[in-house]
Amino acid sequence: STTPVTVTVTGAAGQIGYALLFRIASGQLLGPDTPVKLRLLEIPQAVKAAEGTAMELDDCAFPLLAGVDIFDDATAAFDGVNVGLLVGARPRGAGMERGDLLAANGGIFGPQGAAINAGAADDVRVLVVGNPANTNALIASKHAPDVPAERFTAMMRLDHNRALAQLAAKSGVGVGDVKNVTIWGNHSAKQYPDIAHATIGGRPAPSVIADDAWVTDTFIPTVAKRGAAIIDARGASSAASAANAAVDHVRDWVLGTPEGEWTSVGLVSDGSYGVPEGVISGFPCVSKDGAWEIVQGLEMSEAAQAGLAVSVAGLVEERDAVAELSLI
Ligand code: NDP
């Protein structure tokens, strides 16, 4: 189609924003035939830096880029939005209590949800990247009562991609040969990466790996703590891989997942797999006709059930804490 799709990116002047915007503008988010209009939201102190990024976007002369506008006001930034990438968030400062962190993020994601409710296009799709992503997505969704809750998603895809890479390296295949991993629960150190239904080269992953101790003692903690390992090595948090995962998530949401394959999405629970309704949890999902569907009927081992329960307990605690603070 030739009508541009409006993509709003928050925290656009940050590290992830810098890795993300050029990929969107080059056509990697929505395909090579879809022009995009970018709307960048920043806090006032970072607007100048966002303007610098916009200058660089101009200088790329991307044929698909139909315009870049910069805002420090959420209502204006989300006017007409089709795809919202909510990246900017309040990081945990030294000595910050969890309640302070949740309150600071409530002050960001509540108004952004309200702005989406007020001005977004009917087909709006939202991906929250800024942490705590699942709970920030819940806060935004609760402030957008006219937008279906399943349009507010949280990013589990970086964990998912990290899991694919670890399994490929362990078994000596290309990542394209690894399919149907699931990251259950919260995008936090308590996530549950699950290979029980995954395949490697078309064979069941557990029998290809054939090393339960490696899965429990190496694979799961490596995936769950990969962010910290990158900070250690790079001296800065992962940004390009986070941006890449955001592109993967939205592209699959809009264009569909390949037949027979699922990915991991933070999606509002309908009670599937015992996750309390309304909580935004990582699930195995396929995208069909532009909507995510939770893959049903996967058998879960006792270990998987326990892992999911621990992760979901964290999500329920965060939900109760933001309810207590009247943020939802
Ligand atoms: P980044 O661009 O590196 O990260 C942005 C957010 O993404 C953080 O909350 C970060 O969480 C989160 N994140 C999620 N997954 C990952 C991952 N795998 N690796 C790294 N980060 C991840 O932060 P910067 O500080 O560079 O930039 C943030 C920008 O947001 C700033 O320009 C700031 O001005 C802006 N901002 C904008 C707001 C708005 O538009 N209203 C509100 C608040 C900030 P974590 O910290 O846990 O790593």
Image (cartoon, grey):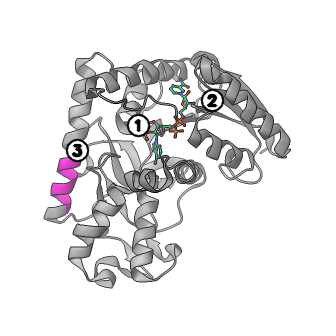
Q: What residue would you read off at disc 1? A: 131
Q: CA distance from mark 1 to mark 3?
A: 16 Å
Rendered location of residue 45, percent (x, y): 61, 19
Q: Identity of the amino acid at label 1?
A: Asn
Front residue (pair 5, 218): 218
Q: Is residue 115 left or right of residue 277?
A: right
Ligand 1 closer than 8 Å to label 1 CB: yes
Give the x, y percent position of residue 160. Answer: 42, 59
Of marks 2 and 3, which one's residue comes earlier in the chain?
Answer: 2
Residue at 52% across, 78% down = 174
Residue type indicated by callout 2: Val
Residue at the spot of label 3? 312
Note whether 176 is above or below 1 in the view shown: below
Q: Secondary structure at mark 3?
A: helix
Q: Is residue 28 left or right of residue 293?
A: right
Left or right? Give the position of 65 relative to 197: right
The alpha-carbon separation of the residues under discs 2 and 3 comes to 31 Å
The mark closer to the camera, 1 or 3, is 1
First to last magenta residue range: 304-312
Q: Earlier in the sequence, mark 2 or mark 1?
A: 2
- Cα–Cα gap, marks 2 and 1: 22 Å
Local crowd size for mark 1, using a 10 Å CA cut-off: few (<14), some (14–19), many (≥20): many
Which residue is painted at 76% across and 37% down in the image? 4
